[in-house]
Image (cartoon, helix red, strand yellow):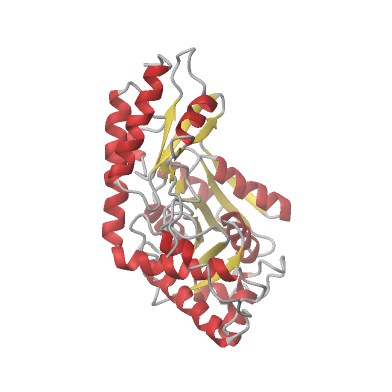
Amino acid sequence: MKTVKRNILLNPGPATTTDSVKNAMVVPDICPRELEFGELTLSVRDDLIKIAHGEKNHTAVMLTSSGTGGVEACLTSVIPDGKKVLIINNGAYGERMQAICDAYGIGHVDYNIPASKPVDLEVLEKMIVDHKSEISHVAFIHHETTVGILNPLSEICHMSHKHGLENIVDAMSSFAGMDIDVERDQVDYLVSSSNKCIQGMAGISFVIARLENLKKTAPIKRNFYFNLLANYEYLQKNKQFLFTPPVQTLYALRQAVTEYFNEGAQNRYSRYASMYEIMKKRVRELGFEFLVEEKHHAKLLTAILDPKSANYSFNEMHDYLFERGFTIYPGKVGSINTFRLSNIGEIYPADIEAFLVVFEEYLRIKKII
């Protein structure tokens, strides 16, 4: 197996991957209409459902796209004509849901919250009651990656069902990194992608859908490539993607899913959480403050307020760290500047500790602390 230079990606995806996932893409060329590839496709689909504990009532639809494509597919495939969706927005990805709906002329009722602030469930329920006759779905981001806030998945989904509504959950950067059970949590549609906590390569999005609900979307003819029901039915009938799949990326996802099960769900959750704790403790000791109140942290990504030092430059810090094998990500919430540290992917506590040494080194060289 070829060994590839290892970079520690502390951006929120694509994440650091194993060499075995990278090498899984080096396979003989194959037509994706062959039975062998069809069996591979079904095995990945079934395991994605298993990761979400949806074997009883859910299916999974895979698409060749970024995660945003999966969100677009879901919103445009399931909101009935003449109905609206209530969108909870406390970050850039909630705003993106609104923009997708605007592009397709889908009506939406917006619960806009200042970015980084939590959902008020009483306010949400009042909005649902006030607009109940207009809306069919409640849509929200589970882990709002732009700020690192965790929204209460189970509570919101149960509330939507209490009022006879379906729900759409963007779990892009929480699926396979946190405990999600679509049956227990009453999730109707959960959207994620191949390049975050599942630790595969970018290029595949998927929607884990309650099958009974998905079948009811047949009258909705708003889209073509992204139609969830059409993609589901074609795969069921032919064991093939409806449109050309990202062949090599699917082989990598197959390997990544296998490695997820080999590690064990609880072990992965614990590994991610342990890295967060190490990072949080040292960053706080160095005098930094967090954007989001700690009790709302997802423990997968943390937004950190930029230091007030005149010597600080995010770009300079990024380059210093990048040259030493660590990649970090900027962030901006309104007029508030932050940088974000993610702890997902094939990384370990020793990697976070090594990063913190270089991070502190830079801060002291530049006299920022």
Residue 178 position in % (x across, y down)? 35, 55
The vertical placement of 330 against 343, above or below, is: above
Question: 125 or 4, which is in the foreground?
Answer: 4
Q: Is residue 295 above or below residue 171?
A: above
Q: Give left or right: position of 46 versus 103.
A: left
Residue 326 quadrant: top left
Q: Can the viewer see residue 183? A: no
Q: Number of numbered discs present?
A: 0
* Residue 182 vs residue 345, the one in the foreground: 345
How far across and down, in percent of the image, does residue 29 sit? 60, 76
Viewer-nearest residue: 329 or 78: 329
Q: Is residue 2 above or below residue 288?
A: below
Residue at position x 45%, y 14% from top? 309
Give left or right: position of 202 versus 180: right
**Is 269 rendered above or below residue 301?**
below
Does the rendering let one see residue 261?
Answer: yes
Give the residue displayed 72% in from the left and 65% down from the top. Answer: 222
Question: Does residue 78 appear to the left or right of 307 in the view shown?
Answer: right
Rendering coords of residue 299 (x, y %) = 34, 43
Q: Residue at x 40, y 53 (%)?
A: 153
Which quarter of the figure is the C terminus placed in?
top left
